[in-house]
Image: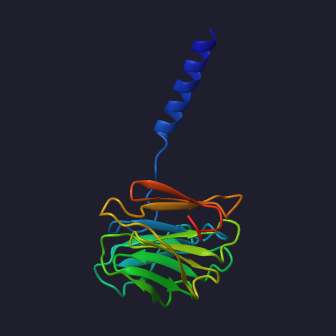
Amino acid sequence: MKILTIIIILLFCSIEVLTQEFELIGPPGGVVRSIGINPLNPNTVYAGQDGLIERSYDGGETGYPLFNKFKNQSVRQIVIPDTDTNIIFASISSGAIKSSNRGKDWEFIHQSSSPVYDIQFKLNPLNNDIIYMNVEGRELWRSNNRGEDWFLLYQFEYISIGLHLRSFDIAKTDTSIMYAGSGGKIYKSTDSGLNW
């Protein structure tokens, strides 16, 4: 009897999930490759497309183009620190850019030598003033002041495309602990990325 009850509950839950529909909010456009949500106001949303970042203040109902300076650039990641939501970081095909005024103006913080590798940002979950940046699958950089200044933390072994720094993450409760995958190996740091 217990098994029959569990099967009926699972079937009911599955039907509920399958009948939910997504709603198109905002204008159709190019390929949306990244989404960034203001951590202090979920109605402020940034969508990264090819050569364009759009901002919405009304939860995606309307969008306003912000960034179309670099043509043929895919916007691969958008990150907004909760310590200052005027600041936006974005990873694009040719590097990493930053805005200090909610997307009105942008500056390069890193220009890539090759568009093959994505630049990845991670915010320290306990202190968003601290930002990490994976550059071109080899280098891990850190800023302690919301991207004003950057210093190289570690240079990972580079073997070939596919065996490079693919991902890294920060422990949520003890941010001195970090993990990274590179060169077919998993690395661990217990001092906020200084040693691995």
Question: For this view, does 160 lie left or right of residue 169?
Answer: left
Image position, residue 16 (x, y; %): 53, 35
**Residue located 47% across and 89% down the image:** 106
Q: Quadrant of residue 114?
A: bottom left
For the question of whether residue 3 can be seen, the reply is yes
Relative to residue 11, is residue 188 depicted above or below? below
**Residue located 64% across and 58% down the image:** 171
Relative to residue 149, is residue 93 depicted above or below? above
Between 39 and 164, which is closer to the camera in this rendering?
164
- Name the quarter where the C terminus is drawn: bottom right
Q: Quadrant of residue 100?
A: bottom right
Image position, residue 52 (x, y; %): 38, 78
Image position, residue 134 (x, y; %): 47, 71
Relative to residue 33, is residue 109 depicted above or below? below
- Name the quarter where the N terminus is drawn: top right
Question: For this view, does 192 lie left or right of residue 186?
Answer: right
Q: Residue furthest top?
A: 1
For the question of whether residue 80 can be seen, the reply is no
Question: For this view, does 40 lie left or right of residue 167?
Answer: right
Between 162 and 17, which is closer to the camera in this rendering?
162
Task: Give the colouring mode of the picture.
Answer: rainbow
**Residue located 32% across and 81% down the image:** 113
- Marker count (numbered): 0
Image position, residue 108 (x, y; %): 44, 88
